[in-house]
Image (tube, helix red, strand yellow):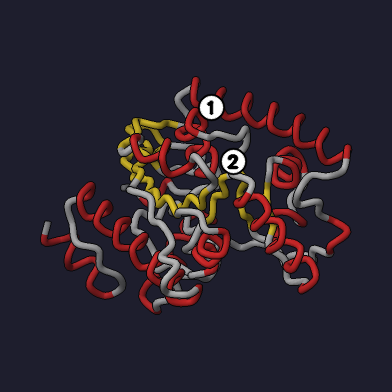
Amino acid sequence: MDETKIAPDRLEVLARIREYEQAGRFDEDVENDPEAPELTPDKVDYLCKKLSSKLGRKIANFLADHYFLKLIKKNILVIDGVTGAEYLEEGLKNGAIITCNHFHAFDNYVVFHCIRKYLPKKYLYKIIREGNYTNFPGLYGFFFRHCNTLPLSSNRRTMINFMSATNTLLTNGETILIYPEQGMWWNYRKPRPFKVGGFKMAYRAGVPVVPTFITMTDDERLGADGYPIQRFTFHVMPPIYPDKTLGEKLGAEKMKEEAYALCKAKYEEVYGIPLVYGEETQAKEEEV
């Protein structure tokens, strides 16, 4: 890859990813995002109870679907296929947490596009960071606020509402997408260590976790940022059910470790190299 063609801001992000991987700082943001305004309880309607929220959701989902399907049709957003689709009908039928690696602003639509026909309810809910909800202007900001998003918040009262809403949605049979790695690492191909929060949600609601993992290959074409367009394959692993004999802390931890192990195995299977981080990474990749 010719790094001289890559946009300077993307080179900065790639350098920061290498630095953070080396230091084991896997859950830290690598983008140069501005400080996020606090999301207060009056600014978010998690369960879409207001008429204005329902109308915004309908318009946003229509526009987003049209926008992303157009990108797929133009071969800008490229999805090469799905493996393990047989696990979706069982895993999503009564509510679920679905997990995925987070490496691109559009990866949530890749998930939705690949699972939509298996969703017993109409929507896929997405947990997003506070700044994505409070900071973004324009069309993307409209999508972030209205496309069935569940923003996290630095406000304690808002987070109480968030936890109550996610539990209600899951027990009502909805599917919620979480990124257990936390922040987005642009075009990063490895699974990163998981946080336990989303697995606690699944355990508390008594629903399975359906782990998924998106792998990438370089297209011959370059994107506007000078980096090769990535071609995505969406992999679904078997659902992981809560073990109610363990209690929430141990049960959620067990689900987390099982999900990470499945993603690690899928990474190693598809790319044909062992998963290593930091100093060992370059040496291992050069051996192959």
In this picture, is 254 found above or below 87?
below
Marks 2 and 1, how far apart at CA: 20 Å
Query: Is disc 2 surrounded by few (<14), some (14 to 19) or many (20+) residues within 10 Å?
Result: many
Q: Helix, strand, or loop for circle 2?
A: strand
| Residue denoted by label 1 | 71
Q: Can residue 12 be seen in this view?
A: no
Residue 246 numbered tag: none
Question: Given this view, does label 2 or label 1 mark the residue nearer the observer?
Answer: 2
Measured as percent of width and height from the top left, residue 81 is found at 34, 31
| Residue denoted by label 2 | 124
Measured as percent of width and height from the top left, residue 254 is found at 38, 70
What residue is drawn where x is 49% and y is 39%?
Answer: 93
Horizontal arrangement in the rendering, residue 274 relative to residue 190 (left or right) = left
Q: Helix, strand, or loop for circle 1?
A: helix
What residue is drawn where x is 54% and y is 55%?
Answer: 178
In this picture, is 79 found above or below 185?
above
